[in-house]
Amino acid sequence: MTKLQIAPSILSADFSRLGQDLQEAEAAGASWVHIDVMDGQFVPNITIGPLIVEAVKRSCNLYRDVHLMIDRPERYIQDFVQAGAQNITVHAEATVHLHRTVHLIKELGAQAGVALNPGTSLEMIRPVLPDLDLALIMTVNPGFGGQKFIPASLERIRILRGWLDEVNPECHLEVDGGVNLQTVESVVRSGANILVAGSAVFNPSGIGRNFKALTEAACACV
Ligand SMILES: O=C(CO)[C@@H](O)[C@H](O)COP(=O)(O)O
Ligand SMILES: [Fe+2]
C-alpha cells in the first residue's frame, strides 16, 4: 500500500498566521498540505488562488496538494503550476475533456489527480485511472470545511481501491471531508492512504497535537 499520510487542509487554518500554522504541522511530522481552491461557480464558496499557493511554498517544505473546485480548471492549471502546485486535482464533473486535462497537468510538470463528488458515478474516473497519481473520493459535498462524513463513501473507497490495485497500484487514494478521530479508522480500512483533514487539525486543541493523534489513529489500523 502507498504511504499513509494526513494532509492538513488550510481551509480551516488561521490565514493571519498561515506560515506559523504550517510550520507547526510540519514540526509534528506532516509532509503534505492540502490547498482548497473554490470559484463560487463549481461550488458555492470562494477561497484562494495562486498567490496563496506561492505563499505556502515560501513558508514551509510541505508537499503542495492543490484541490481545484473550479469550473473548466484547464484554464488555470499553468498558473497553479507556476505558483508551486506539486499535485493538481481537478473534478471530473468540472471539465469536459478529462483525459486532456489530466495530461495537461502532467505535461506542465505536476502530478495529476481527479476528484469525484459524492453523487458522481465511479465509472466517470475509470478510463483515466492508469494515468493518475492520485484519485480523490469526496466524502462530503465540496465547498465547506467542518461537514459531516457521508458513510456511503466507504463502499466507494473500497471499490476504487480494488480498481486501482488492478491498473495503477502506486496511485494515491485520497479522501476529503469529515475525516476526524471518529472516521479515520474506517477510511483507512476501506483503502484510502491520503487523508485530508481541515477542522480536525486546525482547531483550539492544537495543530501538532491533533495531527499526531490523527496519524496515530490512522497508523494503528494498518
Ligand atoms: O475540499 C474540501 C471541502 O470542499 C476540504 O478539503 C475541506 O477543507 C475539508 O474540511 P474538513 O471536513 O476536514 O473540516
Ligand atoms: Fe479539499
Image (cartoon, helix red, strand yellow):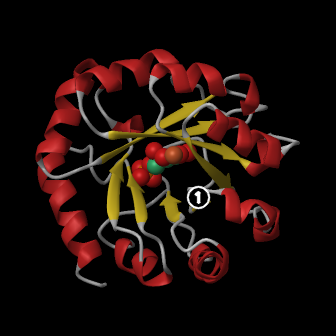
Q: The C terminus appears in which quarter of the rendering?
A: bottom left
Q: The N terminus appears in which quarter of the rendering?
A: bottom left
- Is residue 56 toward the left or the right of residue 28 in the image? right
The spot of residue 176 in percent (x, y) is 50, 56
- Is residue 15 toward the left or the right of residue 49 in the image? left
The residue lying toward the viewer, choosing from 103 and 31, is 103
Q: Residues within 10 Å of mark 1 (few under 14, many from 20)?
A: many
Task: Please name the amino acid that badge 1 sits on.
Answer: Leu
The answer to whether the residue bearing label 1 lies less than 8 angstroms from the nearest atom of ligand 2 is yes
User: Residue, x 65% and y 82% (percent of image)?
Assistant: 166
Q: Is residue 63 above or below residue 150?
A: above
User: Residue, x 55% and y 31% (percent of image)?
Assistant: 37
User: Residue, x 71% and y 45% (percent of image)?
Assistant: 102
Q: Is residue 6 above or below residue 20?
A: below
The residue lying toward the viewer, choosing from 179 and 20, is 20
Q: Which residue is disc 1 drawn over? A: 136
- Is residue 216 toward the left or the right of residue 201 in the image? left
Q: Is residue 180 above or below residue 197?
A: below
- Is residue 161 toward the left or the right of residue 20 in the image? right
- SS at mark 1 in the image: strand
The spot of residue 196 in percent (x, y) is 41, 54
User: Residue, x 88% and y 42% (percent of image)?
Assistant: 96
Q: Residue 157: name its quadrant.
A: bottom right
Q: Residue 27: name its quadrant.
A: top left
